[in-house]
Amino acid sequence: MAVRRRPAREASGSHFLRSKRLACDLAAGAGLAPGALAVEIGGGSGVLTDALARTGAEVIAIERDPALAARLRTRFGALTSVRVVQADATAYRWPDEPFVVVANLPFVRSGAILDRLLRDPRVPLRGAHVIVQWELAAKHTSVWPATLRSTYWRAWHEISIARRLHRSAFAPPPSVDCAVLRIERLAQPRVPVDRHAAYWSFLSSAFAARDPIRRGLRPSLSALEIKRLAPALGFAPDARPWELDAGQWASLFAFARGR
């Protein structure tokens, strides 16, 4: 195992991979073909950037911290397949061509980065393999209770945990274990892409109310309609928003839209 030295200056919330071998395993798990476009969020020490470049992919390494970005440019300046961008991923304009994200996300900003990446399904994201805190991964891959964001994301993506990583795999070690969160584009989306804004509004209203959905979905659906739909879709008529899965929500939205 090759152990990476801890950088003299660390970006807030960053925990860098210690092992080249683990980085190569993560890059291989993303299934990148030579010439494919890979976006790394949080280039950090460059250990994962190097592993991605070795797959033959074209790599865009986004790093928010100016000092770390400068080190990455120095290290990979001779490689035409690697482009280092000093930017905030929550404001970055994603590529117009299909791409895959492989990243060790900074813990303090993981949720915001994922929200930016997955909020607009028109972004040509093919998939993602990202390291996040275990608790965050468990929260967004759970069928029950569901979250607003994961319910929305699952209209166009399958979200699962690919593997668990012990905290000792990072320098400095975080206080919690981590997970590789796997995001894969659905071949058949649950909601049409061009309805994403309306779907977000539909879900947001229901989740914000925190009432049984028969009240939270008014006026989109009446209490009588929900009572009739509940047994067909497999949920209780007085269910709360977080008790429905992504398929049930998509079906309710389709019915409301059809009206």
Image: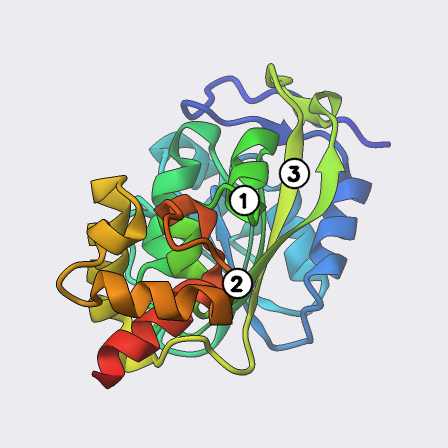
The nearer-to-camera label among 2 and 3 is: 2
Q: x, y (%) of residue 105?
A: 50, 39
Quick one: 90 or 209, which is closer to the camera? 209
Is residue 85 at least partly visible in the picture? no
Residue at the image position 52 percent from the left and 82 percent from the top: 188
Element carrying mark 1:
loop
Q: Residues within 10 Å of mark 2 (few under 14, many from 20)?
A: few
Q: x, y (%) of residue 94?
A: 34, 64
Residue 144 badge: 1
Residue 45 badge: none
The nearer-to-camera label among 3 and 1 is: 1
Q: What residue is disc 2 on?
A: 234
Say whether disc 3 or disc 1 marks the residue closer to the N-terminus. Answer: 1
Kind of residue sitting beneath label 2: Gly
Residue at the image position 57 percent from the left and 40 percent from the top: 137
Kind of residue sitting beneath label 3: Ala
Q: Quadrant of the N terminus?
A: top right
Q: CA distance from mark 2 to mark 1?
A: 14 Å
Q: CA distance from mark 2 to mark 3?
A: 31 Å
Quick one: 93 or 115, which is closer to the camera? 115
Say whether disc 2 or disc 1 marks the residue closer to the N-terminus. Answer: 1
Residue 179 badge: 3
Query: Most extreme residue toward the left, as rendered?
Result: 219
Q: Residues within 10 Å of mark 1 (few under 14, many from 20)?
A: few
Residue 190, by quadrant, is: bottom left
Kind of residue sitting beneath label 1: Trp
Is mark 3 in CB contact (under 8 Å) with mark 1? Answer: no
247 relative to 6 in the view: left or right: left
